[in-house]
Image (spheres, helix red, strand yellow):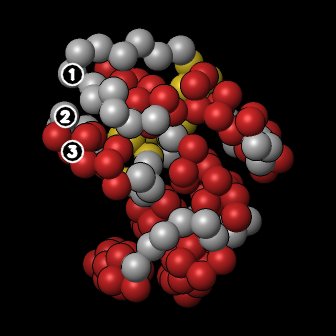
Amino acid sequence: MIVAVADTGPIIHLDEIDALDLLSVVDELIVPKTVYEELKVGTVPSALTHIEYDVVESEVDEGVPIDLDPGETAALAVAAERSAVLLSDDLAARDAGESLGVEVHGSIGVIVLAHTRGEVEKSVAIEQMKALQTETTLFITEAIVEQGITLLDEVE
């Protein structure tokens, strides 16, 4: 069973390529209240209403770095507390999660999981990965996209 805690990055970036529904491939999705409030500052993606998730409060303990933005800090705290996967596209949040022993994946990882679980064909997954690079506000290198494609090949 995969329990995942999302910060704003994957929610925004997957929505930008009309693939927010991919977040439903995790068994339990948690969105910290702080993250939800950050989304409301812009616009909560309408596609989020079609995904089952829980909004939870977070308490940051001493082990969680507070030099991240509030949403990333909250998501990391909840992921650490619940032994969940952190979904984040932010490099600093990913590094902080890994330093705390939290498994971390970004939008590319969500696409790989969707393919692994038979929800997305490989060709569509590749298109989505490339779209993350070319059609979203996410800065992602060609090398990261190629790593994601390699992960798709390993699933086959």
Residue 104: x %, y % from top left: 32, 48
Q: Residue at x 19, y 34 (%)?
A: 100
Q: Which secondary structure, mark 2?
A: loop
Residue 109 disc label: none
In the rendered view of the protein, which quadrant contains the N terminus?
Answer: top left
Q: Is residue 149 above or below residue 108?
A: below
- What percent of the width, then of the height, locates residue 122? 51, 82
Q: Amino acid at mark 3?
A: Glu
Given the image, on which type of amino acid does mark 1 rest?
Gly
User: Which numbered disc flags the more N-terminal residue, 1 or 3?
Assistant: 1
The answer to whether residue 117 is seen in the rendering is no
Q: Determine whether the residue tagged by mark 1 lies in a helix, strand or loop.
A: loop
Q: Front-most of 64 and 48? A: 64
Residue 73 against residue 150 in the figure, above or below: above
- The mark closer to the camera, 1 or 3, is 1
Q: Nearer the viewer, mark 2 or mark 1?
A: 1
Tag 1 residue: 63
Badge 2 local density, few (<14 within 10 Å), some, or many (20+)?
some
Question: What whole-number distance in Å separates the C-alpha atoms at marks 2 and 1?
Answer: 8 Å
Q: For the residues labelled 3 and 2, say whether their Cβ atoms are less than 8 Å apart.
A: yes
Tell me the number on the disc at residue 100: 2
Question: In which image quadrant can residue 17 be found?
Answer: bottom right
How far across and how far down the image is residue 128, in percent? 59, 76
- Circle number at residue 98: 3
> Label 2 amino acid?
Leu
